[in-house]
Image: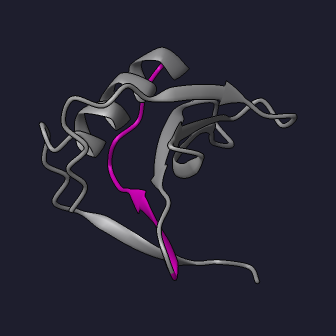
Amino acid sequence: MYTFEDTEFEWKQNGRGNFVCLRDDSLEATVFANRIGMWQIVLNGQPFARLVKDEYFRSPEEAKTRAEYILSGRASYETVQMIPRPY
């Protein structure tokens, strides 16, 4: 469970057009456009990242706001799919 209350998140756009959320130089989340152009959230963690399932957004701003609510502990996300890291 993520509980970063009273934390400001820094978002940066990477070379692929995705947005990454940093906190204290740690990668916390990624917001990306899927194959049909809807935006989704990946919560980064060790050893697995978790895709927030069944949540799709029309803009990266909407997805980033939702990710911040999840990371700050202000929102629930009951269905999360484990994704193995490629390394």
Q: Position of residue 6 (x, y in %)?
A: 21, 29
Q: Position of residue 27 (x, y in %)?
A: 57, 51
Q: Tell me if I can see residue 58 in this picture.
A: yes
Could you tell me which quadrant the C terminus lies in? bottom right
Q: Residue at x 14, y 40 (%)?
A: 75
Q: Nearer the viewer, residue 72 or 59?
A: 72
Q: Is residue 46 left or right of residue 7?
A: right
Q: Position of residue 31 (x, y in %)?
A: 55, 38
Residues rendered magenta in the picture: 47-58
| 38 in the magenta segment | no
Q: Position of residue 9 (x, y in %)?
A: 44, 29
Q: Quadrant of residue 72?
A: top left
Q: Is residue 79 left or right of residue 87?
A: left
Q: Nearer the viewer, residue 23 or 67?
A: 23
Q: Nearer the viewer, residue 35 or 65?
A: 65
Looking at the picture, does residue 82 appear above or below residue 2? Answer: below
Q: Residue at x 70, y 35 (%)?
A: 18
Looking at the picture, does residue 1 appear above or below residue 32? Answer: below
Toward the front, the furthest residue is 24
Q: Residue at x 57, y 26 (%)?
A: 11
Q: Tell me if I can see residue 59 in this picture.
A: no
Q: Residue at x 33, y 32 (%)?
A: 68
Toward the right, the furthest residue is 15
Could you tell me which quadrant the N terminus lies in? bottom left
| 50 in the magenta segment | yes
Q: Is residue 3 left or right of residue 22?
A: left
